[in-house]
Amino acid sequence: MKTNRSALTAALTALAAVCLPLTASAQAHTYLEAHIYETAPSPLELLSDEGFRAFEPLEQPDENYPTIMIDPGRRFQTIEGFGGAFTDAAADVFAALPAASQEAFLKASFDPVQGNGYTLCRTTIHSCDYAADMYTYDDVAGDTALAHFSIEHDRKNRLPFIKRAQATAGGKLRLYASPWSPPGWMKTNGEMLHGGRLKPEYRQTWADYFVKYVQAYAAEGVPIWGLTVQNEALATQVWESCLFTANEERDFVRDYLGPTLHKSGLADLKLMIWDHNRGLIYQRAQATYSDPAASKYVWGTAFHWYVGDHHDNVRQLHDAYPEKGLLYTEGGIRGSWEAASRLVRNVILDLNNWTVGWTMWNLLVDSEGGPRHAGGLMGGSSVNADLKTGQLVFNPPHYVFGHFSRFIRPGARRIACTVSSDDFLATAFRNPDGKIAVVLTNLSDHEQIFQLWVEGRALRTSSPAKGILTIII
């Protein structure tokens, strides 16, 4: 929806023209106009098309005028994609929706032209807490040959959901998978819940289980792009969980999982360690990366946001091991504007610290935030469904996340982007088609003017309080 700009914008822009003299020499630059999209709580705007704004010559920005500066010639990491998680909860809710709501959800989430265009999503190896029940693909104790392995459970709702999303995305949807726990019979505590550890005698069986899973999904027409070794490897939970120290994870990768994947022809899978919070990310990765025999099997480190921010830890891990990938893999989020503000801040800071992709948690939940079989509800989704009416509610985080996923496409390269005001955060990418996408947020509680500066030219505009803008040039 369109809104009128306040008189403050016009007045301050005119003042800036007096304070910041234009130069004739900048007229030769090719940055002439930009297309702006905006989301804000007040006035309410949800990925609103704000039209085009013109650049004007400006040789030198003034340090007192809020300025976002980009340098398209300085390029950094390449983006793999954005998306969410195909949990059993999401699949069951989707299956319960009427056909029209199913189509609306698929278009809003996966359509690359009319929707958020998700291209990288997560799923779970058998059950996690966001499932109506707890299950594995092989419940036969002692079955080291995995003769009873079957993904029949997933054929009911999860695989059909994934396949329809793949079709909506035009076949350009990559999937990675994470386990919450091995089957209980493989663990020291004899159950999938409450932590416990993988028994030494079942390390090879568990590695074989990964291979069976990848091969079974491939046979269903759902290739797996990547794997994480263990979801939240230091969390003892009342739901599915399993503990690995950094050294235990290193040894399992080096001696079992890595070699087994390679011997099975799956060396191209992106294998990721940790899959937990940023606080210990460096120590966890260091244990594996400092061992060449283990490190050679690992593409990168996966991480979450649940305990503190610690964004600088992500950058330091990249600086120490620049050849390794960084992927944000889980962000449980509720549907409020406060949650949307947290989301945009975290995505920008992670991207600016070398992260190559960002996936939210459940793609879809019901109006109660489930279904979920264990423990209290920990988070919701960017989209809720009322299963009594069949109606979908697209929450603010859905639109905020679209500022990234719609406009920063796989293969995009981050470019240099700096900000002169503490009231703004911003990141910028050059897409494979040559267009530049700048995503920024106004952190303040009032409307703020700012300018986007590139190669001697500036575009002046404003952002509503807590606004999120994507500027395409």
Image (cartoon, rainbow, N blue to C red):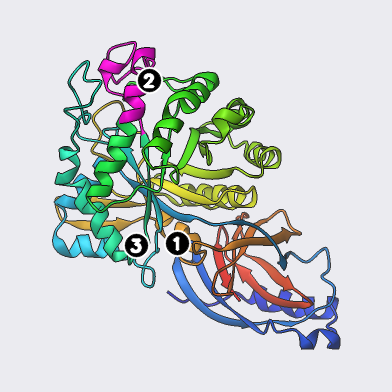
The residue where tag 1 is placed is 402
Residue 181 belongs to the span the image colors magenta = yes
Give the x, y percent position of residue 443.
Answer: 62, 54
Which residue ends up furthest to the front in the rendered image?
263
Report whether residue 304 is seen: no
What's the distance in space between the residues labelled 2 and 3, CA to CA? Answer: 37 Å
Badge 1 amino acid: Gly
Task: Return the disc, 2 or 3, that comes first in the chain's sequence.
Answer: 3
Q: Is residue 8 above or below residue 201?
A: below
- Observer-nearest of 226 and 6: 226
Task: Return the disc, 2 or 1, that comes first in the chain's sequence.
Answer: 2
Give the x, y percent position of residue 9.
Answer: 66, 74
Q: Is residue 185 above or below residue 361?
A: above
The residue where tag 2 is placed is 203
- Quadrant of the snapshot with the C terminus: bottom right
Look at the numbered disc 3 and give the secondary structure of its residue: helix
**Residues at circles 2 and 1 in contact by the CB criterion of under 8 Å:** no
Label 1 CA crowd tier, 10 Å (few <14, some 14–19, many 20+):
many
Badge 3 amino acid: Phe
Going 78% across and 88% down the picture, which residue do you hit? 27
Residue 427 figure quarter = bottom right
Q: Which residues are magenta?
A: 179-208
Report whether residue 133 is seen: yes
Between tags 2 and 1, which lies in front?
2
Going 53% across and 41% down the picture, which residue do you hit? 299
What's the distance in space between the residues labelled 2 and 1, CA to CA? Answer: 40 Å
What's the distance in space between the residues labelled 3 and 1, CA to CA? Answer: 11 Å
- Observer-nearest of 9 and 189: 189
- Quadrant of the snapshot with the N terminus: bottom left
Give the x, y percent position of residue 146.
Answer: 22, 26
Left or right position of 17 against 141: right
